[in-house]
Image: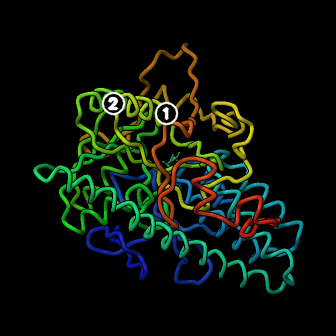
């Protein structure tokens, strides 16, 4: 398809600024980039019902924590347009919340929408819902841009320390613009560094089994960032050989104590980074912070880790691979014995002690209760009633 101009997009696809989600020209249906077709084909799709939105999230046509939140917000808007009654909106909220359990942005967005819609007269709910969904999308873009501004300082420092070679960054999964509305979280500092002309080399972990590394590689190629795909299990080797200056990922849920849930495999990279003395920074916009999990006062070494729901996905994602043959046709082939059981946890939790810092739209903080509350003083217990807490 020809890329379609999305007026506020920043990341370019074939020279056209593009967002991952938008309101279609009819003013009510929702356009997305269908990520199941990437990287082989850039295809868009139009979602017309909240159920289509839920299915798009479940099947990962839209994916990545911030984009899941933005899509869910538009799902609530579609619901408010077709039936703005309390019962109908509550049913849609439940359906959306059941799609994927780990990214807290989903709950954040649905709670925020429902909190705004509930007090409104049903006749006004659709207009309010579309405005708020659009606001959630725009805020995501602004937060990621701010994360980029803070994070690029780290890259500048590394470049100054090593003027004779590129800054070498290892990333995992896709925390790029495809995982958000625009810019990406972990990629925002990279894209800004690239625009400043800082020489970079990004190691892109393949990210079995869903291979989100392919999406990251596609993005980096589009932005002209030097990169190389590596097998997930090559990361330890690269870190140990001194070939990585910075491990930089996104997050699906970071607790108030700084523990980081992200794509499965992040924890192993964090362990290897610590053993090799390489800093590990996590780009976490505020909707990715779960203030309800773990207040850091329980005193255990890795408090609260088990309270983050970890999505278990189909074993078929492990036992089959899908790709394109030389003619461009999609093929799905089995790669493991049909009788062997498989399990597929999709996320893991890296304890805060292995995380060097959190890059948030408000600045960079240590991965600790004190660090995060320093960025969000309104969240301190001593601040009395917490403000900014979304939802009913
Ligand atoms: O299963 P996915 O593809 O939705 O998982 C995405 C990730 O784990 C990303 O790293 C995370 O959402 C951070 S996104 C900016």
Looking at the rendered image, the disc whose residue lies closer to the viewer, 2 or 1, is: 2
* Label 2 vs 1, first from the N-terminus: 1
The vertical placement of 346 against 75, above or below, is above
Residue carrying label 2? 276
The vertical placement of 233 against 327, above or below, is above
Q: Secondary structure at mark 1?
A: helix
The quarter of the picture where residue 219 lies is bottom left
Residue carrying label 1? 267
The vertical placement of 11 against 218, above or below, is below
**Is residue 17 left or right of 256 when viewed as pictured?**
left
Q: Which mark is residue 41?
A: none
**Is residue 289 left or right of 87 when viewed as pictured?**
left
Work out whether residue 312 or residue 50 is closer to the camera in this orientation and state it.
312
Q: CA distance from mark 2 to mark 1?
A: 14 Å
Work out whether residue 189 or residue 116 is closer to the camera in this orientation and state it.
189
Work out whether residue 187 or residue 299 is closer to the camera in this orientation and state it.
299
**Is residue 123 left or right of 240 when viewed as pictured?**
right
Task: State yes or no: Cβ of the residue under disc 2 lies below 8 Å from any atom of ligand 1.
Answer: no
Using a 10 Å C-alpha cutoff, classify the residue at mark 1 as few (fewer than 14 neighbours), some (14 to 19) or many (20 or more): many
């Amino acid at each position: 398809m020809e890329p379609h101009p999305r007026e506020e997009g920043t990341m370019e696809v074939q020279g056209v600024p593009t967002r991952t989600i938008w309101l279609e020209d009819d003013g009510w249906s929702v356009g997305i980039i269908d990520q199941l077709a990437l990287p082989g084909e850039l295809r868009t799709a139009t979602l017309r019902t909240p159920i289509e939105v839920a299915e798009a999230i479940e099947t990962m046509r839209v994916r990545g924590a911030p984009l899941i939140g933005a899509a869910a917000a538009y799902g609530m808007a579609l619901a408010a347009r077709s039936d703005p009654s309390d019962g109908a909106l509550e049913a849609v909220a439940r359906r959306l919340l059941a799609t994927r359990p780990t990214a807290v942005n989903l709950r954040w967005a649905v709670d925020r929408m429902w909190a705004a819609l509930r007090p409104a007269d049903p006749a006004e709910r659709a207009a309010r819902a579309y405005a708020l969904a659009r606001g959630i999308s725009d805020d995501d873009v602004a937060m990621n841009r701010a994360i980029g501004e803070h994070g690029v300082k780290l890259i500048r420092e590394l470049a100054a320390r090593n003027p004779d070679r590129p800054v070498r960054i290892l990333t995992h999964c896709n925390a790029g613009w495809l995982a958000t509305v625009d810019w990406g979280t972990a990629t925002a500092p990279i894209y800004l560094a690239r625009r400043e002309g800082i020489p970079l080399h990004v190691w892109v972990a393949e990210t079995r089994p869903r291979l989100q590394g392919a999406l990251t590689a596609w993005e980096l190629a589009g932005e002209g960032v030097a990169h190389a795909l590596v097998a997930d299990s090559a990361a330890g080797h690269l870190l140990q050989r001194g070939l990585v200056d910075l491990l930089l990922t996104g997050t699906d849920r970071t607790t108030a104590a700084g523990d980081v849930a992200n794509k499965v495999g992040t924890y192993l990279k964090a362990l290897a980074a610590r053993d090799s003395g390489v800093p590990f920074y996590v780009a976490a916009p505020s909707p990715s912070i779960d203030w309800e999990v773990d207040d850091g006062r329980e005193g255990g070494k890795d408090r609260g880790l088990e309270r983050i729901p970890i999505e278990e996905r189909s074993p078929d994602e492990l036992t089959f691979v899908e790709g394109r043959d030389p003619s461009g046709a999609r093929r799905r082939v089995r790669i493991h014995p049909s009788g062997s059981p498989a399990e597929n946890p999709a996320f893991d939790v890296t304890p805060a002690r292995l995380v060097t810092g959190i890059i948030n739209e408000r600045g960079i903080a240590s991965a600790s209760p004190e660090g995060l509350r320093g960025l969000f003083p309104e969240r301190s217990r001593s601040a009395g009633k917490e403000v900014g807490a979304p939802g009913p």
